[in-house]
Amino acid sequence: MLQPNIINVIPLENYMLELQYENGEKRIFDVKPYMKGEWFGELKDISVFQTVKVAQNWTIEWSGGQDIEPKELYENSKLISE
């Protein structure tokens, strides 16, 4: 199944993201399990974490270039509204 495209991302408290999709779904994604190592560890800095935006390829990325695949975002997030 193809997942819908992300149209907006909102950084939340506790390193969570609200993902808004083109089909109207809103989902919550927990970034904490990804914040390992030097590169993704930079996201522990809340000012860096809050730089998240939607990238051109329908995924998200941070100012340092960190990104997470669209499929992973969709499959590992929790639906909060449709």
Image (spheres, rainbow, N blue to C red):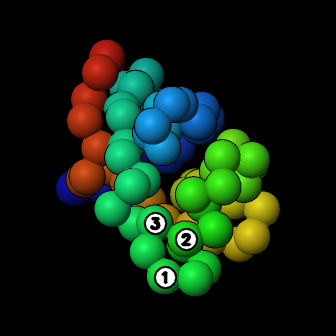
Question: Is there CB contact under 8 Å for labels 3 and 2?
Answer: yes
Image point 25% across, 53% down: which residue? 75
Disc 1 from disc 3: Cα separation = 7 Å
Lateral position of residue 81 relative to residue 56, left or right: left
What number is the disc on residue 35?
A: 3
Q: Secondary structure at mark 1?
A: helix
Callout 2 amino acid = Gly
What number is the disc on residue 59?
A: none
Residue at which label 1 appears? 37
- What x and y, as percent, mark residue 8? 61, 35
Disc 3 from disc 2: Cα separation = 5 Å
Residue at which label 2 appears? 41
- What x and y, as percent, mark residue 46? 66, 46
Is residue 39 depicted above or below 9 in this figure?
A: below
Q: Is residue 59 visible?
A: yes
Q: Residue furthest front?
A: 45
Q: Residue furthest top?
A: 81
Q: Is residue 54 visible?
A: no
- What x and y, as percent, mark residue 71? 35, 61
Question: Is there CB contact under 8 Å for labels 1 and 2?
Answer: yes
- What x and y, as percent, mark residue 4? 41, 44
Image point 25% across, 35% down: which residue? 78
Question: Is there CB contact under 8 Å for labels 1 and 3?
Answer: no
Lateral position of residue 5 relative to residue 45, left or right: left
Q: Secondary structure at mark 2?
A: helix
Is residue 60 depicted above or below 13 in this figure?
A: below
* Quadrant the C terminus occupies: top left
Image point 44% across, 59% down: which residue? 70
Callout 1 amino acid = Gly
Callout 3 amino acid = Met
Is residue 81 depicted above or below 6 in this figure?
A: above
